Amino acid sequence: MVSDVIFNRIVDEGYMRECFRLAQKGKKRVLPNPMVGCVVLDKTGKIVAKGYHKRYGAEHAERNALLKLENNEAEGGTLYVNLEPCSHYGKTPPCVNLIIERKIKRVVIGMKDVNPKVNGISKLIKAGIEVSMVLENEARFLNRVFIKNMTRQMPYVVLKTASTMDGKIATQTGSSKWITSEEAREEVYRLRKEFGCILTSSNTVIADNPRMEHKFKCILDKDLRVEKEAEIFKQGKFYVASSKNTPLKDDQLDIEYVLRKLYRRGIYTVFVECGGTLAGAMLREGLIDEVYQFIAPKILNDNSGLSCFNGDNISDISEARGLKFYEIKNVGPDLLIKGVLTT
Ligand SMILES: NC(=O)c1ccc[n+]([C@@H]2O[C@H](COP(=O)([O-])OP(=O)(O)OC[C@H]3O[C@@H](n4cnc5c(N)ncnc54)[C@H](OP(=O)(O)O)[C@@H]3O)[C@@H](O)[C@H]2O)c1
């Protein structure tokens, strides 16, 4: 027999997963806000309303759900929401006030808000509402971009690389076209659209002369070596970080400074496409949050081939950086592995 406590937890988790599903409907339009979904049950446990945060500036998920109820069927019921309800006046009035007004008995949240202005849980408890939390890790994973933006004032950074099975991106002569398939390259075109900016390097632009179709591109080019005629400048807007507008750190452009500058310009997510030198440097400096690695069904078997990450001389395997893979899929003949850096 499943005990009541376990049964109730399974029920709570089920509704919280529904909040996650609803929240993701706002994915493309809510940044720099979090993705939030809400499910409301009446006092008998029947779902009476659902809602989500649809776009930046629009009403929050709780308000979106509760305002659908004309006769306040939520009285004495339970409200599920994947982020602590807000308690301050922003672009919309505080959600906790509406929850208290609507006489909700219990609120189940996924995670505390990292925004220091939010103090929703204690206001709810003070009003006599029972508050509990479920699936916190999953809730934090869903809103990892928002958490990084809010706590670090920096964009969320994903590095894309495409390699052979032995982690090589080119031969020693620089021959690299093409390691992965046409399908993988099409997937890259689609992925780029999910980000606010592509970040690349002088070396990659000089070596490959890529077009990198995107509305906004940032090129690290300390000594302005990239020619004005390069394909990358023929489309979209771009920002060239050079020693003229960026401080140096160990004789290289200070990449953290560049990322913070992009954030202040409203860039919340960055997709990095570069070779092993910059990838290794960004990894060492802790500037990468996630890696998307395309792996071709090929083995180069050449020690002098160029590696995805060209970092330091590491002697102890325990110093290897750890990732948590969260998606692995076939793209044509290749594999795409998505992983979040964990150490
Ligand atoms: N397989 C793939 O997914 C993929 C993707 C892109 C490129 N590639 C290949 O990668 C090759 C180029 O690789 P690469 O290793 O020579 O170049 P890279 O990693 O793309 O870029 C190196 C450049 O980045 C800047 N940089 C490096 N370290 C830095 C640091 N610590 N701080 C700030 N800036 C730093 C420097 O440029 P400045 O001094 O000019 O600022 C440096 O010359 C090309 O052959 C290309 O085909 C492969």
Image: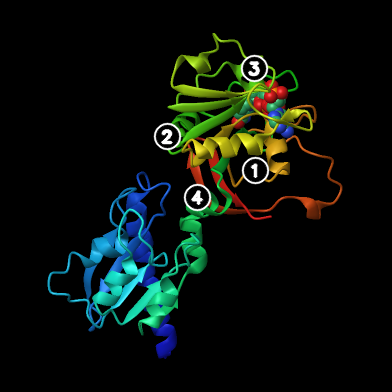
Q: Which residue is mark 1?
A: 287
**Residue under pointer 2:** 193
The amino acid at mark 2 is: Lys
**On the rendering, which quadrant does ligand 1 occupy?**
top right
3 left or right of 337? left
Decide: few, some or many residues near mark 1? Use Cα within 10 Å; few <14, some 14-19, many ≥20: some
Residue 317 appears left or right of 292: right
Q: Does the residue at mark 2 contact the one at mark 4 (Cβ under 8 Å)?
A: no
How packed mark 3 is, by other alpha carbons closer than 10 Å (few <14, some 14-19, many 20 or more), is few
Q: Position of residue 15 (x, y in %)?
A: 34, 70
The answer, for residue 160, to whether it is visible in the render is no
User: Residue 100, image x and y in percent?
Assistant: 29, 76
Is residue 166 depicted above or below 178 in this figure?
below
> Dot 1: what SS?
loop
Ligand 1 within 8 Å of disc 3? The answer is yes
Residue 88 to residue 311: above or below: below
Q: Residue at x 58, y 50 (%)?
A: 152
